[in-house]
Image (cartoon, rainbow, N blue to C red):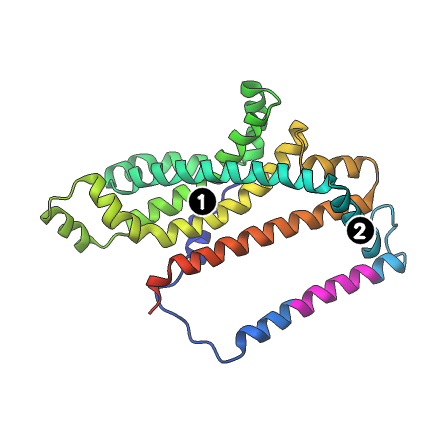
Amino acid sequence: MSPPLASIKAIAPASGKSMQAPGAGLLSWFESVAIFLAIMGLWWIASHAGWISRVFLPTPEASWLSLRDGLGEGESLAYSWATLTRMFEGWLLASLVGIALGALIGISATARAWLQPTLEFMRPLPASALLPLAISIFGLSPSMVLSVVAFGAMWPVLLATVHGFAAVEPRLQEVARCLQLSRAAFVCKIGLPNALPDILAGMRLSLTVSLIVSVVGEMIASQPGLGQAILLAARSFRANELFAGIALLGLIGFASSALLAAFEKRFLKWQQP
């Protein structure tokens, strides 16, 4: 299910730069590491103390060995590459379609009024619920998974783009009319720069959605990837391989989000005072 527009606004970059005390970033980093180590310690205690059967909860050491062996043999790398490829292809397609449609809808108040009910109806639809429909159209093929990933990941970008264009300062619109700018010139010179923070924030949410839908699609459509590997490990009660796959998914999600956040910060440096 696509996130509401409020969540997109919440992570959009603020216009002003907040003041932080010296060392606040380092302290926050230490706190994050401490929480992670506490979770790992709880996992170690629970698995070694036998609170949960090792059939369902392996030890961290066993999961690490499975992860190391899978990466060393190349099997996990192949699965990860398949999932990454599917995720980024769907994300790029969703971003292009979402920005294009969002710009067309956002520059027209009439279009927003007419299409808003339809957008609000389609936005909450879970992409995974459309998998049976996509299977009936495309069959159990990579194209089917790609179409569902693109559909599910499109909505954060589309809604963020619509909001960004709708929030253009009215005086800028008057200036554009005085300069007799065409629609295309208004979109490129005024609309896109104004909507860019919202668009990039929507693309960050979209990247997470594309990873989730890719994994679900691999599980349901039996496509090669981490989703299929995790499902097969669960059915075979290979808990250590299951947790190794989940760890890989977490690393992929964290790394991709961090890279996009760094790009967003650098690309929007002109906004910072």
Q: Amino acid at mark 1?
A: Pro
Q: Residues within 10 Å of mark 2 (few under 14, many from 20)?
A: many
Above or below 180: residue 130? above
Question: Which mark is on residue 118?
Answer: none
Q: Residues within 10 Å of mark 1 (few under 14, many from 20)?
A: many
Residue 177 in picture, x, y percent from top left: 12, 46
**Magenta stretch secondary structure, dominant:** helix
Q: Amino acid at mark 2?
A: Ser
* Secondary structure found at label 2: helix
The picture quadrant where one finds residue 212 is: top right
Whole-number angstrom distance, CA of label 1 to CA of label 2: 34 Å
What range is drawn magenta here?
A: 33-44
Residue 46 in picture, x, y percent from top left: 84, 59
The residue identified by callout 2 is 63
Please name the residue shown 43% across and 60% down the image: 265
Q: Is residue 176 magenta?
A: no
Please name the residue shown 76% across and 48% down the image: 67
Q: Can you tell which of label 1 and label 2 is closer to the viewer?
A: 2
The residue identified by callout 1 is 156
Residue 257 in picture, x, y percent from top left: 54, 53
Please name the residue shown 57% across and 74% down the image: 26
* Secondary structure found at label 1: helix
The picture quadrant where one finds residue 47 is: bottom right
Front-lying residue, 38 or 25 = 25
> Is 249 left, or right, of 232 in this rendering?
left
Front-lying residue, 117 or 151 = 151
